[in-house]
């Protein structure tokens, strides 16, 4: 029904309908952002026995935490953190007051372009998952370990 409404809203233009659905997903995600997220997963990723990542991704219910889409999101986030060693914090409000950014290196995870799909940021991946699952999803925290560093 959402697709039908989107096509009606865009007068049959498929690209316009896709844009409309994206806007609706963002609006739905914003409405859910104040809901408590006490369930989720801790995802791990180890790359060549030299880099390891633990990331906590939370949602509202354990039912959603067990879905394939949620598990895939958690894995994507872990891969992102492993691939970009300069990732420091999840969101901008967690940066230290005296933080000096390095040109070309985004330290905030949610603002980074996805290493698998550079047309989307990590925040957009989370927003897409929120739209799909119907629940608030938060990346709570992460730890990155690298041998010799």
Image: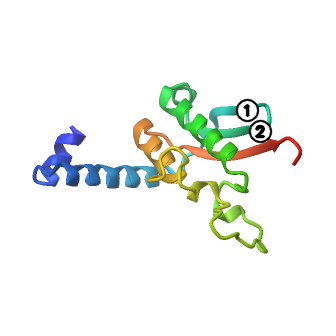
Which residue shows up at 54% across the image and 50% down it?
122
Q: Which mark is residue 130?
A: none
The numbered dot on residue 51 is 2
| Image quadrant in which you'd find residue 96 | bottom right
Per the image, label 2 sits on a secondary structure element best described as: strand
CB under 8 Å between discs 2 and 1: yes
35, 6: nearer the viewer:
6
Q: Residues within 10 Å of mark 1 (few under 14, many from 20)?
A: some
Quadrant location, the N terminus: top left
Q: Position of residue 77 (x, y in %)?
A: 60, 42
Instruction: Identify which residue, 57 or 62, lies in the foreground.
Output: 57
- Residue beneath label 1, please? 46
Relative horizontal placement of residue 82, taking residue 37 as reference (left or right): right
**Residue 38, position in %: x, y?**
64, 38
Q: Is residue 126 left or right of residue 3?
A: right
Using the rendered view, name the quadrant where residue 80 is placed: top right
In the image, 51 versus 139, the foreground residue is 51
Q: Locate residue 121 relative to residue 144 in the image: left or right.
A: left
Residue depicted at 57% across the width and 56% down the height = 112
Query: Which of the colour schemes (rainbow, by chain, secondary structure, one colour) is used?
Result: rainbow
Farthest residue to the right: give it. 148
Q: Tell me how far mark 2 sits from mark 1, CA to CA.
A: 6 Å
Residue 112 vs 39, above or below: the answer is: below
Crowding at label 2, few (<14), some or many (≥20) Cα neighbours within 10 Å?
some
Secondary structure category for the residue under label 1: strand
Q: Residue at x 24, y 41 (%)?
A: 2
Q: Provide residue 75's location: percent of width, then percent of height.
A: 60, 34
Say which label, 2 or 1, has the lower sequence index: 1
């Amino acid at each position: 029904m959402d697709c039908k409404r989107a096509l009606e809203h865009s007068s049959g233009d498929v690209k316009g309908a896709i844009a409309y659905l994206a806007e609706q997903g963002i609006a739905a995600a914003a409405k859910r952002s104040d809901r408590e997220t006490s369930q989720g997963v801790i995802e791990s990723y180890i790359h060549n026995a030299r880099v390891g990542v633990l990331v906590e991704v939370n949602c509202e219910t354990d039912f959603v935490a067990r879905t394939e889409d949620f598990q895939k999101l958690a894995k994507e986030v872990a891969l992102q953190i492993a691939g970009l060693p300069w990732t420091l914090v999840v969101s901008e409000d967690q940066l230290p007051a005296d933080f000096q950014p390095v040109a070309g290196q985004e330290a905030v995870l949610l603002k980074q372009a996805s290493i698998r799909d550079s047309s989307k940021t990590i925040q957009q991946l989370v927003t897409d998952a929120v739209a799909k699952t119907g629940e608030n999803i938060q990346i709570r925290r992460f730890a990155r370990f690298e041998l010799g560093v």
